[in-house]
Structure formats: C-alpha cells, structure tokens
Amino acid sequence: MARHLRFLGLTLGFLFTAWIGTAAPSDHPVGIDVIWAYAGTWDIEIDHFDTANRKASHEKTVLRNDCWKSGGYVACNQYVNGESKVLIVFTFDPRTNIYTSYQVPPDGSAARSGTLSIEGNTWTFPWQSKDEDKTTYFRVVNVFTAPDRIEFRQEFSTDRVHWILMAKGMEKKISG
C-alpha cells in the first residue's frame, strides 16, 4: 500500500503540477479543452521534506505529456525522464465543474481515479488513503504564476484542517 501511495503521489504530483492555466476569461479554453495546456515538455524541480510518508530529497525531472483529444476525452501518455509511466484520461462534468482523471498504469494493474477542482489560478487535486481505522488526506496544490510557470506543493492531513507540507517545487514549460 505504501509503495502504491508513493507512486500515486509522485505520479499525481507530476501530473497535476504539470498543468497550466489561469482564471479563464472568455477567450481561454473552458471545460475539457483546459487540459490541452497540459501537453508539452516541462522541467520540474521538487524538494521533498522529511515526513512520516517520505524522506527528504531533491529531485529534477523532465516530464513530457503526449496528449490527444477524442470527443469529450483528453488522454495523455505521460513520460518521466523519457520513460512512459502512465496513460491519463481526463473527463469534465460541467454540472459540478469537476474534472476527473483516470490513471492507467502500463503494467495492466487496475486504473485509479481522482478529481481536480479549479478556483482562479489555483488547481487542487485531493485524495485520501485509509489504513485500518485511520484516514489520511492528501492534496497537490498548484498556483499558476505565469502561463509557463507553476509553483506547487504536496501536503497531507489527518483532519483536513492542519496540513503538513510533504514537498514543494517549481515547473517551467520548455516546449509546447
């Protein structure tokens, strides 16, 4: 479970910190088309902090999202340092204004899903993990400071009030 949680956290960290967007005026993409900003190649730097879930470390990666759209879906094959890691399929529900992603691993194991909420230039992906009778809440929070730059953080909490910083970083889009 811890291995899957670490992989999911790393994948979601890369995935959701790789997105780019702002509070969309009428000339910006809306709905599922917002995900197109996700396509391209990104330089990522992450500082992981020493927590109950991970040891402190610094990480540099290159993320490439090979994306396409068909109907109401956007799918992206996500490459980390040149290696295909996960196929991500996105949907959007305009009634709730919630995006859903389905992460399909290349090894044929079960796909997982998560949600994304967008408020202005802040995009938040929440999820949770339950071990016996204890639930731990996680989130990746992205703040878009420019069209090609993202400041992000990964946090966890046991009460959804007090959040503990697990990692923070910066991304720069290097090609579209």
Image (cartoon, rainbow, N blue to C red):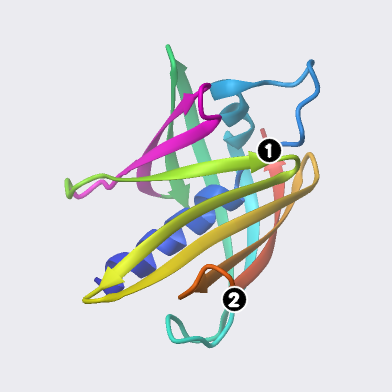
In the picture shown, does residue 163 fall above or below 85? below
Q: Is residue 138 left or right of residue 20?
A: left
Q: Residue furthest top?
A: 71
Residue at mark 1: 175
> From mark 2 to mark 1, how far is it between C-alphas?
37 Å
Task: Compare residues 69 and 156 and report the one nearer the observer.
Answer: 156
The x and y percentages for residue 32 are 54, 23
Q: Amino acid at mark 1?
A: Ser
In the picture shown, does residue 114 fall above or below 133? above
Q: Tally the numbered discs.
A: 2
**In which quadrant of the rendered view does residue 1 lie?**
bottom left
**In which quadrant of the rendered view does residue 174 lie?**
top right
Q: Amino acid at mark 2?
A: His
- SS under mark 1: strand
The x and y percentages for residue 21 are 71, 36
Check if residue 90 falls in the magenta segment: yes
- Pointer 2 or 1: first along the chain: 2
Specify the segment rendered in magenta: 84-107
Residue depicted at x 52% and y 67%: 160
The x and y percentages for residue 95 are 51, 22
**In which quadrant of the rendered view does residue 76 lie?**
top left
Split into 4 quadrants, where in the image is the C terminus? top right
Task: Compare residues 102 and 149 and report the one nearer the observer.
Answer: 102
Residue at mark 2: 162
Q: Is residue 3 left or right of residue 24?
A: left
